[in-house]
Image (cartoon, rainbow, N blue to C red):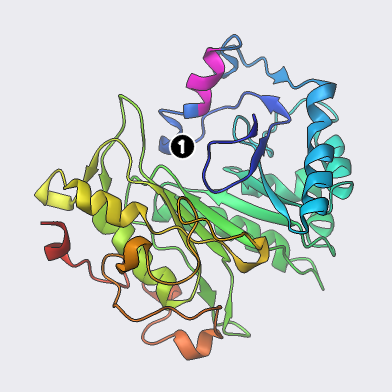
Amino acid sequence: MGLTSIAWADYTFNLWIGCRKVSPGCAHCYAESYARRFWSDPWKTGVYHVTSPQYWKQPLAWDRKAAEAGRPATVFCGSLCDICDPAAPEGAIDRLKGLIEATPHLIWLLLTKRPERLGETFGMFWLGGQRKHVWIGVSAENSERCWNRLTEVWNQGWNVPQLRLPPMFVSVEPLLGDVLVPLANYVGGPYRIVDWVIVGGETGPAARPCNLFLIDSLMGLCHRYSVPLFVKQAGSRPEVGSLGPCSQKAIDQVESWREFPEQFSRPFDPALRLAQGPARDGASPPALSAGARPASPQPVPELVEGPDPFTTAGQPHCAPERRRYQ
């Protein structure tokens, strides 16, 4: 933990080690496999390993380093736990809130599969305050859970008068089915409601197939609404629908599409991070035109054409170009 191999964050931080499985996406949990190597299996015993006081001091050092560098650093909070777990160790969330308040130069990416408990866990007013360095993320493996979990966040936020929700992101990992992420809303808008999308196939010896056509469709949807998309990996079993296994060229093409929100202010790194624009080596990503993307997000009315995503559930916005994968 700390400096991380997870390509979309600078650091990982865990309040405790352990979780409970809530949906099919949890079946081959990498965190469970990782934890077995160092601790007794909290997923089976239900006894969570609380991280040490010394470990909790690390984000303070990261914050100082980010302040000296003059740009924020990102912290993925909850890589080995779920921050909204009802079995959370007593006092852990209050300690986290204090730590977040003390580290204004870190962008905290709070990811959960239990968004219905956000208000109870943190308090919606705390999440929706003036903190610009807290992002709320939901993890979902298919359209049904993506819509349900995002709706849980919106319902809690919209029911509180004068509450402004924090920036939101969606982690579609592992990708197990068609995912239509509702990126914009037209009630009182239009306006963007998801600020970043991360997607990846499942890895490991028991990995389930990842259909690259579905990533392709998600690329088109994000392009349409000028939402940055980060493709983490194609997974251990990348396929192209009924065509079966795909070429390494197709995998490289998909995995080269890695974007970050402008707020992260990351320096350009061609090895890992791509600015908004063409993919690595100048090629456009699958199913996108060769034209350059806008340098910064544009107002939704200038980008939206055709039906509202809220009325076309389950229908991909961008038809995959099969010839690119053959």
User: Which stretch is magenta?
Assistant: 31-37
User: What residue is shown with label 1?
Assistant: 23
48 part of magenta stretch:
no
Name the residue: 41% across, 73% down.
Answer: 223
Q: Relative to residue 93, is residue 305 depicted above or below?
A: below
Amino acid type for the residue under numbered disc 1: Ser
Left-right relation of 103 to 77? right
**135 vs 145, nearest the viewer:** 135
Q: Is mark 1 on a helix, strand or loop?
A: loop
Quadrant holding the N terminus: top right
Side of 16 relative to 7 (left or right): right
Residue for point 47% across, 76% down = 225
Quadrant of residue 167 within the rendered picture = bottom right
Residue 88 visible? The answer is yes
Rendered position, 298 above or below 95: below
Residue 231, x across and y down, in percent = 41, 53
The residue furthest bottom is 302
**Residue 314 shows in this picture:** no
**Residue in the foreground of this view, choosing between 74 and 48:** 74
Q: In which quarter of the image is the C terminus?
A: bottom left
Residue at 65% x, 60% y: name it.
Answer: 264
Q: Position of residue 312 (x, y in %)?
A: 36, 73
- The spot of residue 90 in percent (x, y) is 83, 26
Residue at 41% across, 29% down: 27
Please state which of residues 193 and 105 is positioned toward the viewer in this rendering: 105
In-image side of 285 versus 226 (left or right)? left
Residue nearer the viewer, 260 or 194: 260
Prevailing secondary structure of the magenta residues? helix
